[in-house]
Image: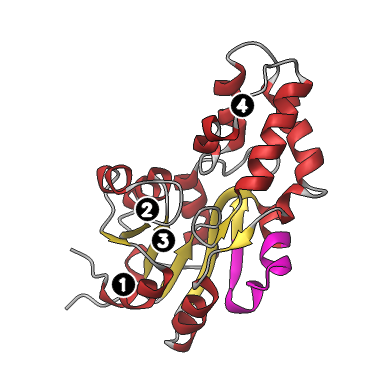
Amino acid sequence: MATPPTTILLDLDGTLIDPAPGILGCCRQALEALGCPARPEEDLRWVIGPPLRGSFVRLLDGRGDPEEALRLYRARYGETGLFEAGVYPGVVDALAALRARGLTLLVCTSKARPFAERIVEHFGLAPYLAGVYGAELDGRLDDKGDLIAHLLAAESLAPDAACMVGDREYDMRAAARHGIPGIGVLWGYGDAAELQGAGATALIASPTELPDACGLIHKV
């Protein structure tokens, strides 16, 4: 009989924290520094989730150097932007409940790992986590599927012992690539259609639902 997972992989942006003010403000500043017209923040919200290096390629569309845009972004983000965020209501209680059930919690984010580590410390999430996995600053592990492969190897973790929790299609597709079930959360930046289209095993509308949802996930 299939058993629930013992290790939960948690996306960061849009799942544990709402990072919009910092990410969008830093994106706008980087684009404007390269001479691109200012964009309203609502037109940039899609950048929350995928790797920023690729997002800047799309945003600039040949009108500037994506690596320079990323450098400008990180200069501000690393100073102030990463703290311009907030933990979603109910997330801390959900993490505490998962830990109380004996589950191992690991952050698995496309955000650069050094930033992710500082964020979970700053917002008081680190005590609930057994580790933080993220992309490297040079672009290694930008692809979330590659990141999950790295995490599984580093943790000596079998895919059938894991579950991915995230708010975007990238989380669900990366998990499915390794045969890991995905719980799509609806309080972040992806909607039900996006998550279901990417193969989410279950959808939840509130962090309060997360502990029970993780307990009900089974391999099929």
**Of 4 and 154, which appears nearest the observer?**
4
Choose the circle earlier in sequence order: 1 or 2. 2
Q: Nearer the viewer, mark 1 or mark 2?
A: 1
Question: CA separation, marks 3 and 2?
Answer: 9 Å
Q: Quadrant of the C terminus?
A: bottom left
**Circle on res. 165:** 3
Which residue sits at x=65%, y=46%? Answer: 21
Could you tell me if residue 73 is visible in this image? yes
Residue under numbered circle 4: 56
Q: Alpha-carbon distance for marks 3 and 1?
A: 10 Å
What residue type is disc 4 on?
A: Phe
- Which mark, residue 175? 2
Measured in 3D between alpha carbons, the distance from the residue under mark 4 to the one under mark 3, in whole angstroms, is: 25 Å
Q: Residues within 10 Å of mark 2 (few under 14, many from 20)?
A: many
> Which residue is label 1 attached to?
213
SS type, badge 4 = helix
**Mark 3 / mark 2, whichever is N-terminal:** 3
> Dot 1, crowdedness within 10 Å: few (<14), some or many (≥20)?
some
Give the magenta-colored segment's residue range. Answer: 118-132
Q: Position of residue 5 (x, y in %)?
A: 34, 73
Q: Residue at x 52, y 59 (%)?
A: 151
The amino acid beneath tag 2 is: Ala
Q: Residue at x 35, y 46 (%)?
A: 191
- When asked about the image quadrant of residue 36, the answer is top right
Q: What amino acid type should be assigned to the residue bearing mark 1?
A: Ala
Reply above or below: 54 against 106: above
Q: Residue furthest top?
A: 63
Contact? badges 1 and 2 (CB < 8 Å): no
Q: Is residue 185 left or right of residue 53?
A: left
* Residue 202 position (above or below residue 49): below
